[in-house]
Image (cartoon, helix red, strand yellow):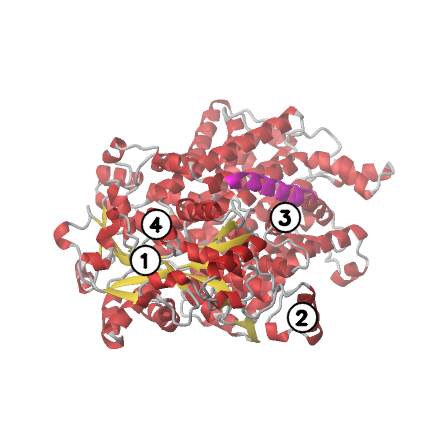
């Protein structure tokens, strides 16, 4: 049998020499690396440049300097912020992974009733724009929110919770990432051979033990990648630290920089740039470490030549416990935030959930939305932009992930390149691409195409992680069989790898689509008159409108995204793609 | 592709650019178009002819789109069918960043910029040029820029917002000193991260009181442990006051609580002597491609017709001959009998950095 059950992740594999590899790069790797460079170098170059130069009052860059770096480390809040950032990022990753992986295990491996609905729940959650997600959690847990009202009424006001705290930040950001973890993890599990789990169960292993010692361990490369992904995203996140942390006087590094640079005059990107550069170095180190850890990833490959479709474990009466877990997670991640948004959208103003608030309902917010022409104009552009971005990202990253996972000479660089945009702050990427497009001799500036190019760069890392998790599970022997039957590399990729990867790629497409259509900071400066997209309209409302209007727009947006996702799923099922 | 400094352009590149400019018929000429300062009797006629040839005009504005910007441009399009007006909406900082990028790349897409913080940013950056509009004579003297780099477009009055359930009528702080009462410790919030946030609050008192008195006050205010509201607009902060998160918020737009209160929300605003008054400004960038249409649009925004449209969208007009909405009159300082302190773009430019430093030193 070609599959071993991993015991521990070993470091014994010899380290390939980087330079020896560079000299003999295959053509495929070179072409892919070139495409990635075109997408990534502009923001990277801008980031380095801005971090090493003085910013002038007119937004141009002046003399060379290291002061942004020294400011970063000598700032009086640096150390406490660093500690907070680490606690916050780790906490977030743990919350997201615990909930997401549990969900994925129950859905992919058990017969808990109702599990097929979890996908829909996760996709609806992904359709909630980030800003709205945070707002809805603050409406829920804030001083006037229903949770605190209930606590104060039943146990007394001293038991009221204070959401503007570290745990508040961790819970809110953690919940934000649960759908991502769930979808990625279920892509891993889907393509992971379940016969080991069956063997464990037959040998008398209880479901929990089986999950712990078989499923989790076999999915380890994927889980580690996820941990890294969520950790990095939390490390550079801004919304939750700003909306939740600052109000409780908790500073993390991103809000620290924001406070030092964004008070007055032209926004200065020097320190933000320096921070991203430092983060980039750390991430490169982490990915290197990750690659070493997953060097023996072939041990985890379980899609082999024999029938591999995973089977379901019968939980017996325990299955209802599984369902309960799913329902609770759904409520936390998707249900409650949407319920509170719907509630707020039907109120003339939001003053918590009280007896009084049930006496006043209004459709005014929706009527206002109905008259909002800018919203209607933007829908078409937004759908085109999201679809084009996803269509560009998914095949590109699938190829990269495959080459990287198969350790084509030098292909490690593809993973590094495609992951780099993860650490570029969206706003800095927006500015960087603005400068690129405005300087190009071709008239790209202000067009939808420019937004698509920038989004493709931004969402490469997500496509990469999706594809990578999937590729790791496919055993090489299938490709070897293809090769020995005379197929070339590309042929093998399209005839063997792509069909096996299809479920992961399809979920990845939808995922990138849903993320890219809600981005605000990136497209804001790139769109021009006539190429507006919905998220920018949403931002306008966020800046100028009332929270009830914002909620109404959010509800309509979520409904629209749910519709798009459902159609997508229906079509793919119909044609038996997944 | 990204130049670090315009001055570092190599000579050959500069030459190539100049040649390209010459070939393109002076499209990116940086010299001021004489029409911008033209005051002759046939100005209107010349603008109409020029604008028709230019065919369109683009404004970058911070106004709210559906209630203000679109109705305004729709009316403009109806009035001047030969000129198609379109917009891009962003915050003042974004508008300035976009203009700076276009200006450096000599690829100007915008003809008019408009916003509350825009004026000071684009003037500091040297990105705009003087222009004349006959409508300026209908605008009060103290709202005119002697350098003619900007015209005012809409006024904003700043006050505190308070939750009427959490702050009973007899305890509402009426003066800045009242905010120092120990009962408000930890219960006041203000908005950081924007020039119309903390820097404006601090600048206002420094201008009105002088440095010593203002500093003494800020030290005491810092003891109140003001909550730094980090992300989201002034409107968002008022919504938090409505929801009871914070009993009091400083330096918010005075009309926002009034609009919410009209719907029954437990919130109100309280003007304090002196009220910080700011004006949004419109400016025309250097190297503007469609100067005639740009002037037509600026004329229109501050005309009686344009100001009436903005007034309907809850903005405060800059023309004395246009009344603000009756419901909002209570927060107009002159009508409420409270002294106002006009904080113009040049004041924010002059005081902004040092006010920001006061915030950094005392309130972080």
User: Residue under circle 2?
Assistant: B18
Disc nearer the start of the sequence (1/4)? 4
Disc nearer the start of the sequence (2/4)? 2
For residue A42: magenta? no
Gap in Å between the C-alphas at discs 2 and 4?
44 Å
x and y percentages locating residue B147 in the rendered image: 42, 72
x and y percentages locating residue B306 in the rendered image: 39, 51
Q: Residues within 10 Å of mark 3 (few under 14, many from 20)?
A: some
Choose between B152 and B103: the one closer to the eye: B152
A179 displayed left or right of B166:
right
Per the rendered image, the range of residues in magenta is A377-395
- Give the chain letter at badge 4: B
User: Residue under circle 1?
Assistant: B319
Q: Are marks 4 and 3 in contact (CB under 8 Å)?
A: no
The answer to whether tags 2 and 4 share a subunit is yes
The answer to whether tags 1 and 2 share a subunit is yes
- Please determine whether, in this image, residue B303 is positioned above or below residue A157: below
- Please determine whether, in this image, residue B246 is positioned above or below residue A124: below
User: Residue under circle 4?
Assistant: B308
User: Residue under circle 3?
Assistant: A449
Gap in Å between the C-alphas at discs 1 and 4?
9 Å
């Amino acid at each position: 049998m070609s599959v071993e059950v991993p015991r521990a992740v070993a470091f014994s594999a010899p380290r390939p020499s980087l330079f020896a590899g560079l000299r003999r790069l295959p053509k495929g790797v070179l072409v892919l690396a070139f495409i990635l460079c075109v997408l990534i170098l502009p923001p990277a170059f801008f980031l380095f440049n801005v971090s090493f130069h003085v910013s002038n009052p007119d937004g141009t860059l002046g003399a060379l300097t290291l002061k942004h770096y020294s400011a970063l480390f000598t700032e009086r809040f640096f150390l406490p912020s660093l500690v907070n950032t680490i606690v916050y990022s780790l906490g977030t990753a743990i919350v997201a992974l615990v909930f997401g992986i549990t969900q994925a295990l129950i859905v992919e491996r058990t017969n808990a009733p109702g599990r097929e609905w979890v996908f829909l729940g996760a996709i609806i959650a992904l359709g909630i724009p980030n800003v709205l997600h945070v707002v809805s959690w603050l409406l829920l847990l804030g001083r006037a929110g229903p949770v605190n009202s209930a606590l104060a009424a039943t146990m007394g006001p001293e038991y009221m919770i204070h959401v503007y705290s570290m745990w508040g930040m961790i819970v809110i950001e953690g919940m934000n990432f649960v759908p991502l973890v769930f979808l990625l993890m279920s892509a891993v599990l889907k393509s992971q051979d379940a016969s080991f789990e069956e063997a464990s169960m037959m040998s008398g292993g209880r479901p929990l033990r089986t999950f712990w010692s078989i499923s989790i361990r076999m999915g380890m490369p994927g889980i580690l990648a996820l941990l890294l992904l969520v950790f990095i995203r939390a490390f550079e996140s801004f919304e939750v630290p700003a909306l939740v942390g600052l109000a409780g006087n908790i500073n993390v590094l991103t809000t620290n920089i924001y406070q030092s640079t964004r008070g007055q005059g032209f926004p200065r990107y020097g320190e933000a740039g320096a921070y991203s550069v430092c983060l980039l170095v750390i991430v490169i180190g982490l990915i290197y470490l990750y690659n070493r850890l997953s060097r023996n990833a072939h041990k985890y490959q379980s899609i082999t030549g024999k029938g591999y479709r995973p089977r379901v474990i019968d939980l017996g009466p325990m299955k209802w416990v599984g369902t309960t877990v799913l329902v609770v997670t759904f409520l936390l991640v998707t249900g409650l935030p949407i319920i509170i948004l719907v509630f707020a959208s039907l109120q003339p103003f939001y003053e918590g959930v009280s007896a009084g608030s049930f006496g006043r309902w209004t459709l005014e917010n929706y009527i206002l939305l109905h008259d909002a022409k800018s919203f209607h104009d933007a829908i078409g552009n937004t759908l085109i932009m999201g679809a084009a971005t996803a269509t560009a990202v998914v095949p590109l990253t699938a190829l990269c992930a495959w080459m990287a996972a198969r350790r084509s000479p030098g292909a490690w660089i593809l993973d590094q390149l495609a992951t780099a945009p993860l650490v570029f702050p969206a706003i800095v990427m927006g500015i960087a691409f603005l400068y690129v497009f405005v300087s190009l001799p071709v008239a790209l500036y202000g067009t939808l195409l420019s937004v698509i190019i920038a989004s493709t760069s931004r969402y490469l890392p997500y496509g990469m992680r999706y594809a990578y998790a999937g590729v790791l599970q496919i055993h090489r022997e299938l490709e070897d069989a293809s090769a020995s039957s005379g197929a070339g590399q590309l042929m093998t990729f399209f005839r063997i790898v792509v069909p096996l990867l299809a479920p992961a790629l399809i979920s990845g497409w939808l995922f990138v689509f849903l993320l890219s259509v809600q981005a605000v900071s990136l497209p804001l400066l790139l769109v021009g008159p006539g190429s507006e997209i919905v998220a920018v309209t949403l931002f306008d409302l966020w800046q100028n409108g009332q929270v009830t209007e914002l909620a109404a727009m959010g509800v309509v947006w979520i409904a629209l995204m749910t519709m798009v996702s459902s159609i997508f799923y229906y079509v793919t099922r119909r044609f038996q793609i997944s | 592709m990204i130049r670090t400094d315009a001055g570092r352009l190599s000579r050959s590149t500069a030459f190539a650019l100049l040649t390209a400019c010459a070939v393109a018929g002076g499209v990116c000429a940086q010299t001021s178009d004489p029409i911008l300062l033209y005051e002759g009797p046939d100005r209107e006629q010349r603008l109409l002819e020029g604008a028709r040839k230019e065919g369109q005009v683009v404004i970058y504005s911070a106004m709210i789109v559906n209630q203000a910007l679109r109705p305004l441009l729709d009316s403009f399009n109806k009035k001047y069918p030969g000129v198609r007006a379109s917009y891009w909406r962003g915050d003042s900082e974004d508008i300035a960043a976009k203009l700076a990028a276009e200006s450096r790349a000599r690829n100007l897409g915008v003809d008019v910029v408009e916003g509350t913080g825009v004026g000071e940013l684009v003037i500091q950056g040297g990105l705009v040029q003087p222009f004349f509009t006959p409508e300026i004579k209908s605008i009060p003297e103290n709202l005119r820029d002697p350098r003619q780099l900007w015209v005012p477009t809409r006024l904003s009055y700043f006050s505190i917002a308070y939750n009427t359930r959490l702050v009973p009528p007899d305890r509402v702080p009426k003066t800045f000193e009242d905010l120092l009462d120990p009962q408000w410790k930890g219960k006041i919030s203000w908005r950081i991260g924007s020039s119309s946030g903390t820097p404006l609050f601090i600048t206002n008192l420094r201008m009105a009181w002088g440095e010593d008195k203002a500093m003494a006050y800020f030290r005491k205010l810092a003891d109140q442990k003001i909550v730094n509201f980090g992300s989201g607009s002034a409107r968002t902060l008022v919504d938090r006051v409505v929801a009871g998160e914070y009993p009091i918020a400083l330096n918010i737009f005075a009309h926002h609580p009034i609009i919410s209160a009209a719907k029954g929300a437990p919130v109100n605003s309280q003007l304090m002597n002196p009220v910080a008054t700011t004006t949004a400004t419109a400016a025309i960038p250097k190297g503007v491609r469609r100067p005639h249409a740009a002037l037509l649009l600026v004329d229109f925004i501050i005309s009686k017709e344009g100001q009436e449209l903005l007034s309907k969208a809850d903005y405060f007009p800059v023309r004395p001959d246009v009344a603000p909405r009756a419901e909002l009159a209570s927060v107009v300082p002159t009508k409420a009998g409270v002294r106002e302190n006009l904080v113009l773009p040049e004041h924010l430019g002059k005081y902004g950095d040092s006010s920001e430093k006061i915030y950094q030193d005392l309130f972080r």
